[in-house]
Amino acid sequence: MGDILAMLRPDAGTTPVPGKDRRRKREREKVQRELASLPEKEIARLIQSLEEEMHEAAVELKFEYAARLRDEIADLRRELRDAR
């Protein structure tokens, strides 16, 4: 429930953390570099395993986790499409 409230009111009850956005950007760039080095077959296999994990999470009623996996899968598909 905290995630939903954070989306609705991003500034409510949070303390700014210096450099937080820069760290996220560096982490995202690192992941993108690592993905770029993977063969397309490996990315497709990763997508398949994440989809299976997403479906299991939904069955276990872990909807927020399943949604995060769904978003990650979408990002990976975008990376795969852009790599072609």
Image (cartoon, helix red, strand yellow):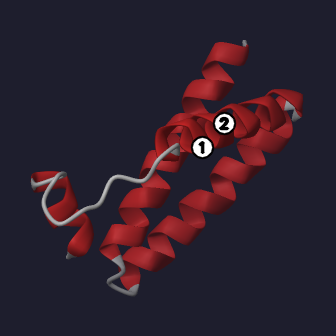
Q: Residue at x 36, y 80 (%)?
A: 62
Of the numbered discs in the image, which one, if any, rests on residue 9?
none
The residue at the point 89 percent across, 30 percent down is 37
Tell me if 25 is positioned left or right of 16 in this view: right
Q: Amino acid at mark 2?
A: Arg
Q: Please, what secondary structure does the residue beneath circle 2 have?
A: helix
**Residue 29 appears left or right of 40:** left
Q: Which residue is mark 1?
A: 23
Q: Secondary structure at mark 1?
A: helix
Which residue occupies 75% across, 37% down? 30
Q: Position of residue 78 (x, y in %)?
A: 55, 26
Vertical placement of residue 6 versus 53, above or below = above
Between 65 and 31, the residue placed more toward the observer is 31
Could you tell me which quadrant the N terminus lies in?
bottom left
The amino acid sitting under disc 1 is: Arg
Q: Quadrant of residue 14?
A: bottom left
Crowding at dot 2, Cα within 10 Å, few <14 / some 14-19 / many 20+, comes out as few
**Could you tell me residue 17's position as x and y percent?**
42, 53
Residue drawn at (52%, 43%) of the image: 19
Q: Are marks 1 and 2 in contact (CB under 8 Å)?
A: yes
Horizontal side of residue 29 vs 34, given as left or right: left
Q: Residue 8's x, y, as percent?
A: 10, 54
- Picture layout, residue 41 above or below residue 5: above
Q: Which residue is mark 2?
A: 26
Instruction: Please say if 15 is above or below 32.
Output: below
